[in-house]
């Protein structure tokens, strides 16, 4: 599938989705959102894809909503309906990313702002290069966090830190992001792509069905009682216990060899 503003490359079990408007730090347009929705719909359905990387071309990860999209309207005194725009773009994209039943890694190669932070937070893991920066830029243009920012960020870094970043719009660097748990790892810029690729390739050889279930269980458990969480775990475990990967894992352990998981 050929896209205008993103690229999708496959290498073994890994699909890499690259936001590709480097001159605008990969700011999200309506076209890019539609393309991301299409790409994520496809990688979710493709059983050969067992890990997904989201990254940006050039020196940015994603500068959030492209502010020039509505500029002409604002200059002519119109006020576009942001709710309609959100419903069409982020409200479709962000749940698709969150609910993808395979590991999704944000490879944050540079600056992430506004909806770009939300996109990274919607991924399961965030690996930052030393050049990464993060800003909840919404407040700087008189807006509230959207694109799931109020739901995602507190889950990643806690309420107090999410509130501080969202109220101030302060830009934090990769080291500060690591300190507050916004990213899982920081990798030197030289060799960043290679390390991300190796990490994703490892995840793509793991038991994908169990990873998908694990994501869903942990997400749901935040809103459940302990009793209900135990019940959900038992349901999921009963299903995982029937998978080929479970059998392979147990056999590999017994036979003292590396398992060869197929993802199902
Ligand atoms: O309306 C709705 O739909 C509501 C939805 C909102 C969701 C949101 O995401 S709101 C937040 C939108 N994003 C921002 O407010 C961030 C704006 N950008 C910045 O603050 C800075 O660019 C950065 C901190 C991200 C990076 O700064 P810096 O100094 O490294 O780069 P720069 O020079 O500012 O930007 C480089 C180019 O990218 C520049 O273009 P030019 O002048 O070279 O042609 C700049 O205009 C462009 N760019 C950066 N961000 C955006 C953008 N163009 C359009 N939209 C952007 N968001």
Image: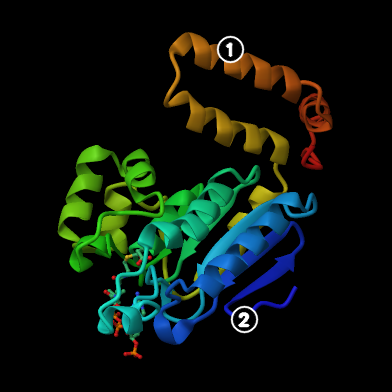
State the CA–CA distance, disc 1 to disc 2: 45 Å
Q: Secondary structure at mark 2?
A: loop
Counting labels gives 2
Tell me where residue 105 appears, x and y as whole percent: 54, 55
Towards the viewer: 114 or 200: 114
| Disc 1 residue lies near ligand 1 with CB under 8 A | no
Q: Label 1 neighbourhood size at 10 Å, few (<14), some (14-19), many (20+)? A: few
Q: Residue sitting at 40 percent across and 49 percent down?
A: 148
Q: Quadrant of residue 82?
A: bottom left
Depicted 250 relative to depicted 17: above or below = above
Q: Residue sitting at 43 percent across and 87 percent down?
A: 23
Tell me where residue 68 appears, x and y as whole percent: 36, 81
Q: Residue sitting at 62 percent across and 46 percent down?
A: 100
Regarding residue 195, the answer to whether it shows in the image is no
Determine the quadrant in which ligand 1 lies: bottom left
Depicted 65 relative to depicted 120: above or below = below
Q: Label 2 neighbourhood size at 10 Å, few (<14), some (14-19), many (20+)? A: few
Towards the viewer: 249 or 77: 77
Depicted 185 relative to depicted 192: above or below = above
**Horizontal placement of 229 versus 206: left or right?**
left
Labels 1, 2: front one: 2
Depicted 259 relative to depicted 112: above or below = above
> On the rendered image, what quadrant is the C terminus found in?
top right
| Disc 2 residue lies near ligand 1 with CB under 8 A | no
Q: Which residue is mark 2?
A: 4
Tell me where residue 260 appears, x and y as whole percent: 81, 41
Towards the viewer: 209 or 146: 146
Residue 231: numbered disc: 1
Q: Quadrant of residue 151?
A: top left
The residue lying furthest to the bottom in this view is: 23
> On the rendered image, what quadrant is the N terminus found in?
bottom right
Regarding residue 101, the answer to whether it shows in the image is yes
């Amino acid at each position: 599938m050929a896209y205008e503003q993103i690229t999708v490359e496959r290498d073994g079990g890994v699909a890499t989705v690259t936001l590709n408007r480097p001159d605008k730090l990969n700011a999200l347009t309506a076209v890019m959102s539609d393309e991301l929705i299409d790409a994520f719909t496809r990688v979710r359905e493709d059983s050969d894809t067992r890990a997904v990387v989201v990254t940006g071309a050039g020196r940015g990860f994603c500068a959030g909503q492209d502010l020039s999209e509505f500029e002409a309207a604002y200059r002519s005194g119109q006020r576009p309906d942001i709710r309609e725009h959100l419903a069409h773009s982020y409200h479709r994209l962000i749940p698709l990313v969150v609910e993808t039943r395979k590991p999704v890694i944000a490879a944050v190669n540079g600056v992430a702002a506004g909806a770009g932070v939300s996109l990274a937070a919607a991924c399961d893991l965030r690996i930052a290069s030393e050049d990464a920066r993060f800003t909840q830029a919404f407040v700087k243009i008189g807006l509230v966090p959207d694109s799931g920012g109020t739901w995602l960020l507190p889950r990643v870094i806690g309420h107090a830190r999410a509130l501080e970043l969202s109220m101030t719009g302060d830009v934090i660097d990769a080291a500060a992001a690591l300190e507050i748990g916004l990213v899982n790892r920081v990798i030197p810029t030289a060799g960043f792509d290679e390390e991300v690729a190796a990490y994703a390739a490892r995840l793509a050889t793991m038991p994908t069905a169990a990873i998908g279930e694990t994501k869903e269980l942990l997400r749901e458990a935040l809103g459940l009682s302990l009793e209900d969480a135990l019940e959900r775990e038992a349901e999921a475990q009963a299903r995982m216990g029937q998978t080929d990967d479970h059998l392979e894992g147990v056999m590999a352990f017994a036979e003292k060899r590396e398992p060869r998981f197929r993802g199902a």
